[in-house]
Image: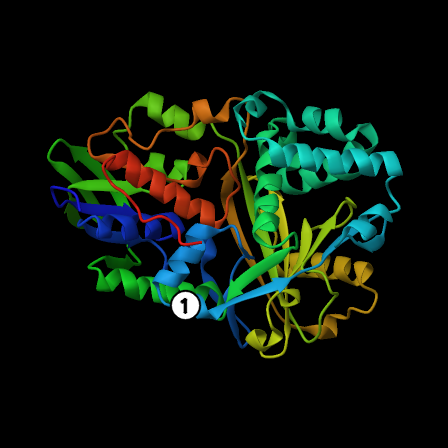
Amino acid sequence: MTNQSLHYGIVGGGMVGLGLARRLAKLGHQVTILEAGDSIGGLAGAWQLGDVTWDKHYHVILMSDFLVRDLVAEIGLEQDFRWVETKTGFYTDGQMYSMSNSMEFLKFPPLGLLDKIRLAMTITVASKIRDWRYLERVPVATWLKRWSGGRTLEKIWIPLLKAKLGDAYRESMATFIWATIARMYAARRSGLKKEMFGYVHGGYHRILAALKSSLEKSGVRVITGAKVAGIRSDATGVRCEISGTEHRFDRMILTTNPHVTNRLLPELPAEDRHRLTDLRYQGIVCVSVLLRKPLDRFYVTNITDSWVPFTAVIEMSALVNREEFNGHSLVYLPKYVAPDDPLFDESDASIRNRFLAALSRMYPHFSEADVIELQVSRVREVFAISSRDYSKRVMPFKSSLPNIWLANSSQIVNGTLNVNESLALADRAVKAIHPEATFPPSKR
């Protein structure tokens, strides 16, 4: 507990905001979460899909996600973890391949033996890098070509980079691919060299409900439907307007994306404003499809064919017991695009027709009659592109305004956006605000 109890207002009830509230409450502070939506969780939130309630976007827990595992244990759900060995598919040149073990990798037809050796070496090299900062000055395509060679770059890496980053892959540095590989290798080290992925019975809907209950028991106030209109601060504290009513706090932490943050802080100095907006973001259009039967045996199917309108096929029911989906199969079809991409304005009906037509071409046994329910989620700003010297350009936690702090996904400088990284970001922000704070070590 710190010496002085303060009243913190946290704008945003996503995983960063919830993580901040959890830590600050344990330090003895009063905390109010202000969430504009009608539920908490942000990108980890759930929705109703037919007769199933599950995550709106695809999530998986790795054995190396110690912060998530500690949180789940703390809120009393540790016994509901399920760990599963999954399989990976690869769709290229109109053909589906399994890439779930070393033997299948060696048999992978699109690459020659030397290509495969160099690809394996690339992954091994990336997994052993600890000092990542020099990678911020090496374009990702340059680094991958150096280690994997030109053919593998053009055949495998460029399609995968474009699927996640679009044309912005040209601006992205090698930290992007390093962070992706490092996360998966950490999972394998913790999972006996197997792709052991996990989930909690009931999904994040259940985790969030238990976390909200735990926070409220510790004194945290969670207000949904709280659309903050503007924030002003001075040396005495912070004032914010919600539905015409002024609320006062000692300090405020904004977890909103940089463009929303700029709008809420009209007094923010030009230098801070520039640092917030001088970032290029990727958004996502994610289609959730509830099916009568599975598509295939793979949890993740990577796609390199450019005609496919989505980035990958995530078959959640290849990981999660189908009893969670009332015997059905749940599939996510994500497409990562720039915030101004026309896909955001395309109708649900048009997206449905294009995406299901592609599924029919990829999986000849699939029929639209198999579809029970389909819904489309659109989020224009999900993660920032890791451009040159990114960690030096990103906004610090403390803004130039008195009593205003910032903690958002753009400040993840050496990892990929996921729930565990969001909790880690919240911890770093609390340590920046209260350097004397200590957190219990992980029991994992």
Q: How is the image coloured?
A: rainbow
Residue 151 spot, x, y in % from top left = 83, 32
Which three-letter amino acid code belongs to the residue tagged 1? Leu
Task: Give whichever of 220, 26 is nearer the camera.
Answer: 26
Looking at the image, is 325 positioned above or below residue 176? below
Can residue 345 be seen from the camera position used here? no
Query: Quick one: SS at disc 1?
Result: loop
Task: Give whichever of 124, 299 is nearer the camera.
Answer: 124
Residue at horizontal 55 percent and vertical 27 percent from the top: 387
32 lies left or right of 158: left
In the picture, the quarter occupied by the C terminus is: bottom left
Task: Give whichever of 396, 415 is nearer the camera.
Answer: 415
Looking at the image, is 180 positioned above or below residue 94? above
Can residue 117 be seen from the camera position used here? yes
Residue 75 spot, x, y in % from top left = 35, 64
Q: Which residue corresponds to mark 1? A: 77
Residue 427 spot, x, y in % from top left = 34, 43
301 lies left or right of 219: right
- Disc 1 crowd rating (10 Å Cα; few below 14, some 14-19, many 20+) is some
Residue 286 spot, x, y in % from top left = 59, 55
181 lies left or right of 297: left
Q: How many marks?
A: 1
Residue at horizontal 85 percent and vertical 53 percent from the top: 95
Residue at horizontal 61 percent and vertical 64 percent from the top: 84
Q: Quadrant of residue 398?
A: top left
Looking at the image, is 362 positioned above or below residue 405? below
Residue at horizontal 50 percent and vertical 34 percent from the top: 414
